[in-house]
Image (cartoon, helix red, strand yellow):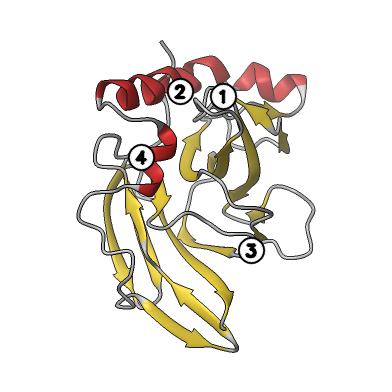
Amino acid sequence: MNFGSKFLLACVVAGTTPAIAQTVLPQVDVTSPKWETRHGGYVISSNFQVDPRMSAVIYPAEPFQKGDILDFRTVRMADDEYFVLQECTSADCTQGHILRVWTRSGALDTVHDPYRVSIPHEGKFFMWMQRFPMAGGGSFSGYVPTSPPLVLNPIGTPEQFHLCDVKAAQERGPVKVLSSEHNGSQLALHFETGSTVFIQRMHAAE
């Protein structure tokens, strides 16, 4: 059973679905402005939640809306780590679509802003980090955008796939979040590999 299957099973055992897991989270006051600031015409928030059942999955405390912006930064991240923004594309979340993958250098895609992504529509979004250890170091150059939840299928050269056991890495699943803390309007995520990333949500102030 891969980690994506465990993700779905955890939701079933809990008597819920991935959609509900995103929008109904324990001990989160989604109306509180405590973690919000206003700057440059934007409301900026760090109101995210690490899933209490699966410590590798991060959700926005309120569902993303069309026009929201997710900002990603890192100060410590390995070459073989990939931070993923994914959404469910089926009602039971057996299929997903990856909007963006970030490495320590920014977006893996060729985009205008390597650290920000605009949310195209309301949906069930979640974030996680995947590690693909590669003998001798290095990282993949792309990814397949359609995949089951919590599954990242990389694109690279035959040599890279020879140096990396992709299947074994996928079976190990996403990297766990050891701790998280609000750092102003950013949420700092500290992973078990020693990596730290910062995420924040932005939308135009009314």
Q: Mark 2 points at which residue?
A: 4
Relative to 194, 202 lies left or right: right
Relative to 179, 114 lies left or right: right
Indicate which label's residue lies in the foreground, 4 or 1. 4
Q: Which of marks 3 and 4 is nearer the N terminus?
A: 4
From the viewer's side, name the closer residue of 43 and 73. Answer: 43
From the viewer's side, name the closer residue of 12 and 10. Answer: 12
Amino acid type at image mark 1 = Pro
Residue 196 drawn at (x, y percent): 40, 56
Can residue 100 be seen here? The reply is: yes
Point 34% across, 49% down: residue: 194
At numbered mark 1, what does the secondary structure look like: helix, strand or loop?
loop
Q: Name the residue under label 3.
A: 116
Q: Name the residue under label 1.
A: 148
Whether pointer 3 and pointer 4 mark residues with C-beta atoms closer than 8 Å, the reply is no
Residue 120 drawn at (x, y percent): 69, 54
Indicate which label's residue lies in the foreground, 3 or 4. 4
Q: Earlier in the sequence, mark 2 or mark 4?
A: 2
Amino acid type at image mark 4 = Ala
Asked if 167 appears above or below 199 in the picture, the reply is above
Amino acid type at image mark 3 = Arg
Location of residue 72 (image quadrant): bottom right
